[in-house]
């Protein structure tokens, strides 16, 4: 079974619920090494995505992803707005106007999202950013590419979770946390954590 | 019309303050601050930046300057979303110095590439090296205006020399600045009562010296 516009919209609604549930946790993580607004910003952005989807559901999965992108760019702010916005925008572009997405398209969308984040944030693996969650997520998704959408997303979620955990020991080299230098080690990166939460929500929706 | 500037900052006050400083040196340039969140908080707002770019564009293009990382991302994303991204550039420059240099370049009629280059060059320490080796003429002047070679007078001086075919330097003590660079002039820290030595070379050297002399004697247009 592939994903329809309704399916993608439901995955985003699930993501909004998970972000709302973990709002305080993301705030705490960001307060330790950033400016403390990540949870609030992400929650505001995803609630706005849900509101936008409720008022008019686009006709293609790509259209749904694009609506999410523009909403996140406008509502999230901070670094996460342009980063997640770019990820969803690139994902929407790569699936163009297809009426339904199969496993291969989902993998391509994840890959495009990763490339968008890398280009926008100019971060590489090991910088203690969302790239550290997204990169292993895409690698795992590509490995599971032969399966169905649920298998791809579940592999991506596992990859992201492991990748996010790996940021604890890293010293930040990007963003506000990089000004802390060595003091940034010992904390989970909030962006990597939110990436992991989003992919877990997508996997759950596809199950 | 001159190139417009947009200042993308996490703080509305910061963007407005930098715009205020730069506007003093570039009265005809449109400088639009885009700082903070719509509700007044700290952060960068994509929609405000896009709106600011539209306001700043009078047809000659726009250059954006930013303070910290996510402001850069917001600026770059806004540029990519425009119908014609080639009319707009994001300057990789320190916000205050870059904006001042960009504003003066725009005031002097530089195109988008020239304004971007001026902003980027501001990241390097001001040129204190002497361009005066071929100097043919020299004049000593005493600054009588209240603020010396501070921001506005420095900008007026650099601007007045822009059209002339002459290399001009200003010396104060053992420091020498390229008179075409506002930042270099300001770095001299010349104050009221200081005696500066102005050297000029090139085809219009004599005229350049006369221009500087007139400006100093006129207190750069300020009341004495």
Image: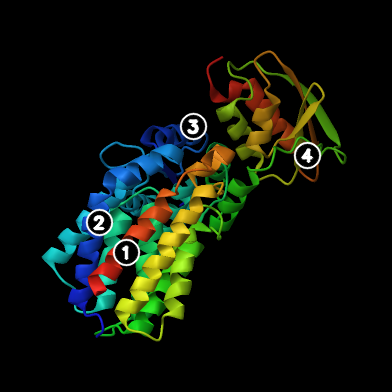
Q: Identify the secondary structure beneath mark 4.
A: helix
Residue drawn 68% across the image and 42% down it = B124
Closer to us: B49 or B196: B49
Relative horizontal placement of residue A6, taking residue A102 as reference (left or right): left
Q: Which residue is mark 2?
A: A18
State yes or no: discs 1 and 2 in contact (Cβ < 8 Å): yes
Foreground of the two, B192 or B188: B188
Name the residue beneath numbered marker 1. A200
- Decide if residue B170 is on the left or right side of residue A50: right
Residue under pointer 4: B205
Which chain does the residue under circle 2 lie in?
A
Q: Secondary structure at mark 2?
A: helix
For label 1, the SS is helix
Does B124 appear above or below B85? above
Residue B59 visible? The answer is no
How many numbered discs sit on the rendered protein? 4
The x, y position of residue A204, in whole percent, is: 26, 68
- The residue that label 3 is drawn on is B21
């Amino acid at each position: 079974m592939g994903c329809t516009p309704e399916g993608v919209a439901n995955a985003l609604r699930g993501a909004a619920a998970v972000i709302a549930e973990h709002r305080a946790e993301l705030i705490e993580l960001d307060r330790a090494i950033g400016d403390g607004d990540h949870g609030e910003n992400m929650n505001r952005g995803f609630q706005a995505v849900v509101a936008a989807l409720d008022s008019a559901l686009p006709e293609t999965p790509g259209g749904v992803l694009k609506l999410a992108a523009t909403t996140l760019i406008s509502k999230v702010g901070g670094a996460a707005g342009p980063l997640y916005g770019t990820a969803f925008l690139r994902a929407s572009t790569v699936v163009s106007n297809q009426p339904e997405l199969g496993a291969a398209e989902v993998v391509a969308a994840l890959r495009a999202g990763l490339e968008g984040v890398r280009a926008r944030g100019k971060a590489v693996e090991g910088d203690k950013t969302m790239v550290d969650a997204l990169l292993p997520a895409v690698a795992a998704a590509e490995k599971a590419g032969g399966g169905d959408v649920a298998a791809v997303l579940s592999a991506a979620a596992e990859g992201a979770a492991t990748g996010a955990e790996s940021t604890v020991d890293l010293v930040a080299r990007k963003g506000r946390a990089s000004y802390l230098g060595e003091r940034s080690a010992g904390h989970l990166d909030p962006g990597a954590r939110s990436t992991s939460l989003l992919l877990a929500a997508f996997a759950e929706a596809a199950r | 019309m001159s190139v417009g500037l947009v200042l993308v900052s996490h703080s509305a006050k910061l963007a407005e303050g930098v715009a205020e400083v730069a506007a003093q040196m570039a009265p005809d340039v449109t400088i639009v601050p885009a700082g903070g969140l719509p509700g007044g908080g700290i952060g960068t707002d994509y929609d405000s930046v896009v709106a600011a770019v539209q306001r700043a564009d009078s047809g000659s293009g726009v250059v954006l300057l930013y303070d910290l990382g996510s402001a850069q991302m917001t600026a770059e994303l806004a540029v990519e979303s425009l119908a014609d991204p080639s009319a707009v550039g994001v300057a990789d420059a320190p916000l205050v110095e870059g904006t001042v240099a960009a504003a003066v370049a725009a005031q002097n009629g530089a195109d988008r590439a020239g304004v971007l280059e001026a902003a980027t060059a501001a990241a390097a320490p001001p040129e204190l090296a002497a361009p005066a080796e071929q100097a043919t003429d020299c004049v000593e002047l005493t600054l009588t205006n209240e603020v010396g070679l501070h921001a506005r007078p420095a900008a007026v001086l650099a601007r007045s020399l822009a059209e002339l075919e002459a290399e001009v330097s200003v010396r104060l003590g053992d420091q020498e600045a390229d008179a075409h660079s506002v930042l270099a002039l300001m770095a001299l820290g010349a104050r009221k009562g200081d005696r500066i030595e102005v050297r000029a070379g090139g085809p219009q050297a004599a005229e350049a010296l006369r221009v500087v002399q007139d400006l100093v004697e006129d207190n750069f247009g300020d009341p004495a």
